[in-house]
Amino acid sequence: MKKLLLWLLGILVALVLLVYIFVFSPIGNAIFKPIVQSQINKHSPLPLTLDRFSLGLTSTHIVLKNGEKLIIDLSGSYNLFTLGVDFDLFVDANDISLFGEMAGIELAGAFEVRAKAVGKVFDELVVSATSDIARSTSVFNATLYDLMPTKITAQISAMRIDELLAMLGQKPYVSGVLGLQADITGTQDKEPNFNGQATLAITQGGFSKELIQKDFDIEIPRTSWNANLSAIFDMDTIKHNLVFNANVGRIISSGDTQLSPLLTKSTYSINLSDISAFTPLVGTKIRGAFRTNGEVIGGASQMKISGKSDIAESNTTYTALLESFSPKKIAFDSKGLKLEQVFFMLYLPKYATGLEDASGEIWDLDKGISAQVISSLKGMVIGDTIKREFDLAMPNTPFSYKSNVRLQKGVGEADFILESSLANLALNPIKIDLSSTTIATPYTITIPNLKALKFLTGIELLGKLEANGKVKIAQSIEADFHTQSLGGQLDAKLNGDDFSAKLNDLDTLSLLKMAQYPQIFSAKANGELTYNLAKQSGNLHAVLSQGHFMKNDLSNLLQQYVKFDLTGLVFNSVGIDSQINKLNLVSTFSAKSGDFSMHGDNILTDLEKGTINAKLKTAIKQDSVDVHINGALSAPQIEVDFSELVRKKAGQVIQNEIDKQIDKHKDKAIDALKGLFQ
């Protein structure tokens, strides 16, 4: 038994020695130093070198450096059994440009921090610090008992906010001089009870016009401000009063906060004539006036923020419920929101004017978002803005829409109906999946007057169009399109930039009438169209059947000079092949019926200018003529070249006359020939 105890004691001593060797001895320090350095490299926002690492049983000395720009020196003694400590910390930042690099700006200057902690960790511990950080004169003293503060005094004067933000790795969009006075005493009770007061004041406040312009590409007006925050500690309650005064308005908040449990009842009021300087806080370009007021009631477990606002000249009320300071549910109701004011606030062109009403609730913000939102709007699209921004000559267009969105944890449906003088569109129901950013919906669209869409189509069309299909928006857009408004069936698909369409028995007279071209040929068109939206190029292959020419200049000319009735023919398998480049077509055309045929290559059509240039080789039985078609598509000039036919006919007439004369004087001709050889 004795040997066993001695053996166990020996093992224990050996383990202690091993722990000492691998942790507290120079050998152990040498082993752990690269491990600590690797963790510093991984987590430190600044490049730091572990210059010294000494960890003993009763003392330590650690030095971190960034060249000569930054030195952090921690040294002192401690007792592992009594948990007594006597530490000194010295931070010597000789060149704060190091922090400027972290924040992405230029900084110059230096600061020091000297701190000391003396006492026992779970008994009385006194912490004191002095610093000239951010060019301030700062003194801090605190007495803790069982790690609970029993007395805190602080005095800060002339601290530069822009430098402080940069040292914290934040861009200094805000500047000012901060001062703080605090004298607070507490009890040693388990529940926090404090008496005293603290006052924070910021003077000479401003916003960095240069930095905001550089990062957000906007120019803000000169904005100066100052702020005062006073807090009176009365046992477990803090009464606060905040006043932010600026040349663009005021922010006020006051109320009472109970420390245990953490509960507050506060009011707030924001009245600002221009919020452009607050762009960095919002994270996007914003401007215009903003006013709101309300109250905050609750604590850490549940808090309610409610208020009203006239944002974008609306009448808006809102309520937000928070749990553990995270949004739980948001409800809002907005009446008369001015659309043009929203565009102005977001630095967008005034695409439209209008008034919008919207109300709804949003919840499950951490679970994909659930929502029930209803909105409606009546407005006017501004044609001048559309022309300036998109080079589209769109007229001023009144419109209205209604929508209803229903989501359950990121998945749901929506209905959307748009009515305007140009088109009516219904999307119902829209399938939404926020997890995959997918939207899919059937649609119906009615365009009562295609002529009004010339600014979009590039050509003037007549008539109306009714169509339906489905649209899916994910990583790309997929859609199909079906209509019978063209005297037949047109089925089209869009997949990303690739557009294709199938033509089934389309009526050419309906198409020509819609395009306002002469209705010279009646047929049923079948074929395929492919077009790439990005390249703006494609191909058309069509076959016309059951076709016949209507009376036109060409048929009249053929009837007059050739005595040929073109309108009496029936054409099948008429071929049209076109290469499309934007609104320019290069085509081939071929048609045949009985003894009549017509063929043309390199037929040039400019749909934007509405012109055509074509030469058609035309054969009538054994004869041929050239047909030239030039000029405007709506009234082309047709010229028929009969010269070859005339020459052929003239030759035939002459030959016939010669033959007649030879037959008539045949005997005399023979006698004359005989006389020549006698």
Image (tube, grey):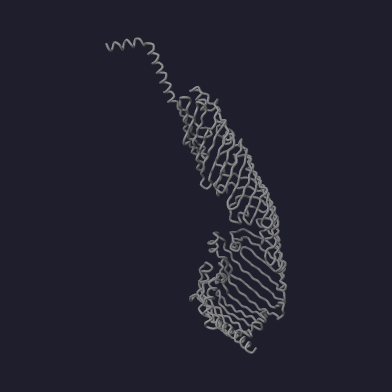
**Of the pair 137 and 374, the residue shown nearer to us:** 374
| Residue 653 coordinates in the image, percent (x, y) | 42, 18
| Residue 592 coordinates in the image, percent (x, y) | 51, 29
> Where does the N terminus fall, quadrant-wise?
bottom right
**Of the pair 200 and 246, the residue shown nearer to us:** 200
Q: Is residue 660 left or right of residue 289?
A: left
> Which residue appears at 52% of the width and 67% of the height?
105
Q: Looking at this rendering, what residue extends furthest in the left direction?
A: 678
Residue 59 visible in the shown view: no
**Of the pair 94 and 475, the residue shown nearer to us:** 475
Task: Decide: is 133 above or below 436.
Answer: below
Task: Decide: is 649 above or below 196.
Answer: above
> Where does the C terminus fall, quadrant-wise?
top left
Q: Looking at this rendering, what residue extends furthest in the bottom direction?
A: 2
Looking at the rendering, which quadrant does residue 13 occupy?
A: bottom right
Looking at the rendering, which quadrant does residue 243 occupy?
A: bottom right
| Residue 434 coordinates in the image, percent (x, y) | 64, 56
Residue 24 visible in the shown view: yes
| Residue 644 coordinates in the image, percent (x, y) | 42, 25
